Image (cartoon, grey):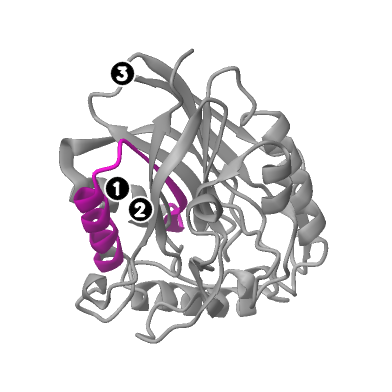
């Protein structure tokens, strides 16, 4: 299963502020947006989806830790774990650096996690892509925006496999050069952590759909298929779009329009998809405050090992 949690606010204004005063004002506005996004309610809704589906492994993206002047305001991982109880544990984690706030300290980390059933034994790996987007901040100069991956090597019924979770660069119009960076990250992913002797399960928000609306279309998803990956949705639902991202990161509108299929489950090697579905479309999964669990749908797949010769 894969689920982007939605970090809860737009970070673009934080990296565009021209004065310390403006940055402080933007930060306060960003934190108000975070509060309005109802992270506790949304993560409770995500936990309910996970518990009802009961997958063996879960890849999570945009696992945010929001801070102000050294004090943790909201930790998405902690909130989700509290809702899940001891059924799942964090098996692998990656957290990047953070943009500055007006105090000179970080305001948010945005990481990736892999959750597994508590009894599953795994070997964890994590890393950061060499290719990353850089932007010029009016106050502090050049800021790198790293992206990363997490993986676990595990066994089910004695059969080994690797489970990789990632979040590739977003291709928004205002992010100049983002599409090229994403393509480089996808190539690095395919040649690195997603290349193993054992069967590979690749999940995540890869931010790539050649037919996307609302973002710049890219070929990263197709390139992974050309490299030997089976795209579970395309394989089992070839005539359905299977869109997974609500345009404009919308979580409040009950009729929010879906614009791209950027959340995927893929396989390579002696493993194949048997069933795949989207979770988070049912209005009943919305929070009491009227928010969708995320601006992304979850993708849940049932996989099977190929028969041994």
Give the left or right position of residue 174, taking residue 295 as reference: right
Task: Judge whether residue 49 is colored magenta.
Answer: yes
In the figure, 176 relative to 270: above or below?
below
Residue at (75%, 67%) from the top-left corner? 175
- Residue 122, visible in the rendered structure: no
Instruction: Count neighbours of disc 2 (C-alpha within 10 A) and say few if under 14, some if 14 to 19, many if 20 or more.
Output: some
Give the left or right position of residue 297, taking residue 167 as reference: left
Residue hosting label 3: 157
Where is residue 84 shown, x and y percent of the image?
A: 20, 46
Which of label 2 and label 3 is nearer to you?
3
What separation in Å lies between label 3 and label 1 (alpha carbons)? 30 Å
Where is residue 228 shown, x and y percent of the image?
A: 67, 36
Residue at (70%, 70%) from the top-left corner? 172
Give the left or right position of residue 284, taking residue 195 as reference: left
**The image quarter in which residue 255 lies:** bottom left
In the figure, 287 relative to 161: above or below?
below
Residue at (17%, 42%) from the top-left corner? 85
Looking at the rendered structure, the secondary structure element under dot 2 is strand
Q: Are marks 2 and 1 in contact (CB under 8 Å)?
A: yes
Residue hosting label 2: 75
> Which of the pair 45/197 is nearer the observer?
197
Task: Judge whether residue 194 is colored magenta.
Answer: no
The stretch in magenta equals: 41-70
In the picture, the disc for residue 225 is none
Residue at (17%, 36%) from the top-left corner? 86
Q: Residue furthest front?
A: 309
Looking at the rendered structure, the secondary structure element under dot 1 is helix
Which of label 3 and label 1 is nearer to you?
3
Residue hosting label 1: 78
In the figure, 287 relative to 40: above or below?
below
């Amino acid at each position: 299963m894969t689920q982007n949690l939605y970090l809860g606010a737009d970070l673009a204004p934080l990296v565009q502020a021209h004065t310390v005063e403006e940055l402080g004002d933007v930060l306060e506005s960003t934190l108000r947006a975070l509060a309005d996004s109802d992270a506790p309610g949304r993560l409770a809704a995500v936990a309910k989806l996970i518990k009802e589906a009961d997958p063996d492994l879960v890849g999570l993206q945009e696992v945010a830790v929001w801070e102000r002047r050294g004090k943790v305001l909201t930790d998405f991982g902690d909130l989700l774990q509290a809702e899940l109880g001891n059924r799942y544990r964090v098996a692998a984690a990656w957290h990047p650096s953070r943009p500055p706030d007006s105090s000179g300290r970080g305001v948010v980390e945005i990481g990736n996690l892999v959750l597994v059933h508590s009894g599953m034994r795994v070997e964890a790996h994590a890393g950061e892509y060499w290719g990353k987007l850089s932007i010029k901040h009016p106050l502090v100069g050049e800021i790198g925006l790293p992206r990363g991956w997490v993986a676990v090597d595990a066994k089910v019924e004695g059969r080994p496999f690797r489970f990789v979770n990632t979040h590739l660069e977003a291709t928004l119009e205002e992010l100049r050069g983002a599409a090229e960076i994403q393509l480089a990250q996808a190539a690095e992913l395919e040649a690195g952590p997603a290349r193993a002797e054992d069967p590979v399960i690749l999940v995540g928000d890869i931010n790539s759909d050649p037919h996307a609306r609302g973002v710049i279309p890219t070929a990263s998803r197709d390139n992974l298929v050309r490299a030997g990956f089976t795209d579970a949705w395309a394989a089992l639902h070839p005539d359905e779009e299977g869109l997974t991202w609500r345009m404009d990161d919308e979580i409040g509108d009950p009729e929010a329009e879906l614009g791209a299929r950027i959340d995927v489950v893929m396989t390579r090697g002696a493993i194949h998809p048997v069933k795949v579905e989207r979770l988070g479309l049912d209005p009943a999964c919305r929070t009491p405050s009227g928010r969708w669990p995320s601006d992304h749908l979850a993708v849940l797949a049932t996989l099977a090992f190929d028969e041994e010769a």
